[in-house]
Amino acid sequence: MHINKSKAVSLLSDPRAYRRKLKLNQTDFWGRFGVSQSAGSRYETSRDIPLHLANMMVLIDQDYIPSEIIQTIRSMYQNPSNNI
């Protein structure tokens, strides 16, 4: 397995164009990465994407991290009392 560098550059350099190419709305696109629609909008227009989020976005987008694992991690954060 290897990272598709041109795809990663496209995703991170212009996330709005990348999202539109996938025909996803902001809520669905940014939700894949655990980001709210409003934060995603800021990343698309003016704010730099933090390095940890950029790394995660590339790994998720290129299917290095299965969606089931992402959902499990999200549920752990949303329901911390269930993790004991």
Image: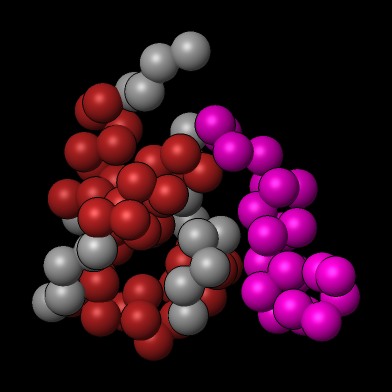
Instruction: Tell which of 32 and 83 is nearer to you.
Output: 83
Instruction: Tell which of 74 and 83 is nearer to you.
Output: 83
Q: Residue furthest front?
A: 84
Side of 53 where 37 appears, left or right: right
Colour treatment of the image: secondary structure
Q: Quadrant of residue 43?
A: bottom left
Q: In the rendered structure, which segment of residues is drawn in magenta?
A: 63-84
Residue at 24% x, 41% y: name it: 10
Side of 65 where 5 appears, left or right: left
Q: Is residue 59 visible?
A: yes
Compared with 63, 26 (above or below) is below
- Residue 80, percent from left and from top: 74, 78
Residue at 67% x, 39% y: name it: 66
Q: Quadrant of residue 74?
A: bottom right
Q: Quadrant of residue 46?
A: bottom left
- Residue 51, percent from left and from top: 24, 55
70 part of magenta stretch: yes
